[in-house]
Image (spheres, coloured by chain):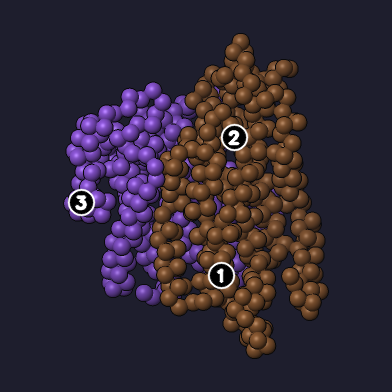
Chain colours: A purple, B brown
Amino acid sequence: MFQFVLARVLWLVPTLLAMALVTFLVMHATPGSPLDPVAEGANPLSPEAQKVLAKHYGLDRPLYEQFAIFVSKAVRGDFGYSFVYKTRTVQEIIAETFPISLLLGSMALVLAIVVGLTLGILAALYQNRAWDYVSVSLATVGVAVPNFVLAVFLIILFSFILPLFPTGGWDSPRNWVLPTIALALAPMGIIARFTRASMLEVIRADYTLTARAKGLGEFPVIFKHTLKNAFIPVVTLLGPMFAAVGTGSFFVEAIFRVPGMGRFFVLSMTGRDYPMIMAVVLTYGAFLAIMNLAVDLLYGVLDPRIRY
Amino acid sequence: MIHAETRPRSSSLWRDGVRRLRRNRLAVAGGVVVVLLCLIAIFADFLAPLPYTKTNFSRLNEPPSRAYPLGTDQLGRDLLSRMIYGARVSMLVGLGAQVIVVLIGVPIGALSGYIGGRTDLFLTRFVDVMYAFPRLLFVILVMSMLGAGLTNIFIAIGLTGWVGIARQTRAQVLAIKEKEFVDGARALGAGFGRVLGRHVMPNALTPIIVAVTFGIPEAIFTEAALSFIGVGINPPTPSWGQMVGEGQQYIRSYWHLCVFPSIAIAVTMLSFVFFGDGVRDALDPKLK
């Protein structure tokens, strides 16, 4: 067990390093430079000014040297100053925006898990009846339709037709409702589909039959004998789920004007804000990798048949 | 292409599949919408009442009316015409990107699985690293570096999309190359290319087809998402995602700007998913 955890934690290092390298290569292999603004009407910088700036930000050094400097500083948590917000360090911006994205993502995930599991269980228990169709259609819409499109429908429904919630902002918990739902629908659909499939399998398993044969009622059969076993395959989904919520937040945060990291990500990309891009990609990458590790460990706790 | 002695069996697999697919009403409905969308995309020039660039500055942001069935946008352009041309972008990206993904992914996966050894180890490691990257994050990164445009979308999706299909092909080839009929073909003197091309690949086709049917809506989604945040299709070419992205800023005052393209995206995605589910269940009932 301990060895397994250690190995997985150590494996994080090459993974993150590879991600940093790929991102770095993509940034530098493509045409364009942060010193040469491509925005229409932007003042082109004189070659001398470009040279001075390049020297200041270390962009005049050979690429391998730039990468080495980046890694050695990043290890100490220093990502440097943002190119776009010149007076602020990248750490400051991330420290300010990441908690907001984390709050939104966690709320969405909790909602997705609670509602998704409920829908999946109901669908399996009432297979091919009304509940099943409701759950499956909801799940399909959540999985198939992009969250920014769902967000538009949510705003129309719950801000205009029924004026219950504001169209955007992040000041009060009332603002949190619509973005959370918009972000939760996709993972909710995936969870509901999976729970339904795995419940259907478990309900037909021999041990469920045994439990019924012992004379147990419907309630203890479902809650004591089937649910726990049905959950096990669903737990594996949580990894990709974090990724879906993480990348989904770019769009949801843009539509609902949430001041989280997702919005900064897109802005930093189009602005060629090298330090920001690296930091944001690595923050997402590290977060996802750690969550995947946590999910793997949880899997072992839930299913005693698994040994590391 | 197909061997004489395998023809009856393999054609009955397809016939069975089509029969099962036709019995699935949801899949048929999805398929009909997909065909309609393709027709709209092909005949956009005839169907659109106005060119998508035609502006009318005296009628900006108008709600639906007789002259403009879906209203006009911020520049007074006919929304219906722009939506019709938007179908062209979606279909082009959805289908075109899959061609690229298959052309890259299938050979890599097949070779990796068939040759094995160090080639396989190297490729699987590479694929693992690509998997650790959140897909959309990488596509956005590549697009914002390359700049918006249809060609670049193909490059970005092709660069990231092949990974999944390569993995799938590899797994298939690994399983099939151990089968007796492959040994038989080899014993009869079939060379590397013939064994892989005529004996292994035709049997590995089903999951690849299923992966492609699900890859199409994913590519359409990717294009819409990229255009939504402004790194996808270059204006003035209309794209549904871009129309939602621009329209949602004015959702308070001009709801029609983003609602109609949103409906188009939702209907398209659902149709492809229904159709894809049907194809999967029809070709391989076990996969369900």
Q: In which quarter of the image is residue B196?
A: bottom right
Q: Earlier in the sequence, mark 2 or mark 1?
A: 1
Q: Which of the two residues, B21 or B15, is positioned nearer the viewer here?
A: B15
Q: Which of the two residues, A262 or A47, is positioned nearer the viewer here?
A: A47
Q: Which of the two residues, A287 or A221, is positioned nearer the viewer here?
A: A287
Query: Which label is found at residue B110?
Result: 1
User: Residue A3's spot in the image, x, y percent?
Assistant: 28, 73
Q: In this view, does B18 lie to the left or right of A238?
A: right
User: Residue A229's spot in the image, x, y percent?
Assistant: 51, 67
Q: Which chain carries label 1?
A: B
> Circle 2 sits in a helix, a strand or a loop, which is it?
helix
Quick check: B49 above or below A144? above
Type of the residue with mark 3 = Ile
Circle nearer the viewer, 2 or 3: 3
Badge count: 3
Query: Which label is found at residue A69?
Result: 3
Q: Which of the two residues, A72 or A105, is positioned nearer the viewer here?
A: A72
Q: Can residue A249 be seen in this view?
A: no
Residue located beneath label 2 in the image: B240
Query: Which label is found at residue B80?
Result: none
3D distance between C-alphas at marks 2 and 1 = 36 Å
Q: In which quarter of the image is residue B121?
A: bottom left
Q: Residue at x 45, y 39 (%)?
A: B147
